[in-house]
Image: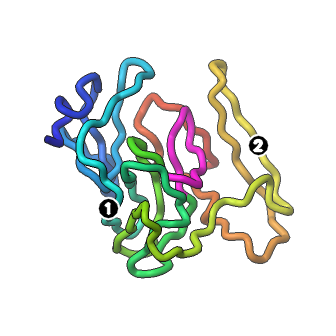
Amino acid sequence: DGSLSAIYPTAISNAFMFDAGYVSSDSVWTGAGFWLKFDSAQTVPLPGTLNLQDTSEVRKGWNIIGSISDTIPTSSLGQDPPGIVLSSYFYFDSSYKTATKLAPGVGYWVKVSSSGSLIHSYAGWPKQSVAAAPAGIPAGLNSLAVRDAVGRNQTLYFGASTDADLRLELFELPPLPPEGTFDVRFA
């Protein structure tokens, strides 16, 4: 039963998936990622069958994907066709943050160059090297950290990098989060 009332009975909103814009849904399913609103932080048990392999169908551009029943590194996701992932993987925790692992029950943003599939497998799908955002400030770039009164923060990078191999798309943020959430970016 993928209905919100069965899986997330304490949610105070519909689920929102992303398909070139936010689309409301009253149910959720594996492989896809969703925005949900709760009235407070809470632990939500996810009953059901253990899922150690799944596929997220993606379309060209930004997508929200889900995960499987155990934490896996982003580098273990298979790509079909190969090499379609353009961005880092992001999750939202008061602001967008770069992910190196996918955990159950969390939605992750990823930008792809064409429609295809991302294959999640705990058993170890053939490893494809998926670039992650470099640690620290890349050579030649400056950073600007913005923090609000309640401690939410976001770091933005700007300048001209001297690193010829730097993939700037790794620093592109996903689409704006739903209204009322913290987000800082250049315009």
In the displayed structure, 67 sits above or below 46; it is: below
Residue that extends furthest to the left in the rendered view of this protein: 1
Mark positioned earlier in the residue sequence (2 or 1): 1
Q: Quadrant of the N terminus?
A: top left
Q: Are marks 2 and 1 in contact (CB under 8 Å)?
A: no
Q: Which mark is residue 14?
A: none
In this rendering, position of residue 135 left or right of residue 113 = right
- Residue 10: x and y, percent? 28, 22
Q: Nearer the viewer, residue 177 or 126?
A: 126
Q: Quick check: 159 left or right of 60?
A: right
From the top left corner, tell me how far across and down residue 72 is, in percent. Answer: 49, 56
Specify the amino acid type for callout 2. Leu
- Label 1, residues with CA under 10 Å away: few <14, some 14-19, many ≥20: some
Local secondary structure at mark 2: strand
Q: Determine whether the residue tagged by mark 1 lies in a helix, strand or loop.
A: strand
Q: Is residue 81 magenta?
A: no
**Dot 2 corresponds to which residue?**
144
Residue in the foreground of this view, choosing between 40 and 7: 7
Q: Which residue is mark 1?
A: 54
Q: Which stretch appears magenta?
A: 89-102
Marks 2/1: CA–CA distance: 38 Å
Name the residue located 57 percent from the left edge and 51 percent from the top edge: 99
- Which residue type carries mark 1? Asp
| Label 2 vs label 1, nearer the camera | 1
Residue in the picture at 34% in, 73% down: 115
Residue 42 in the image, given as x and y percentages of width and height:
41, 22
Image spot of residue 77 (x, y percent): 46, 67
Front in this rendered view, residue 2 or 136: 2
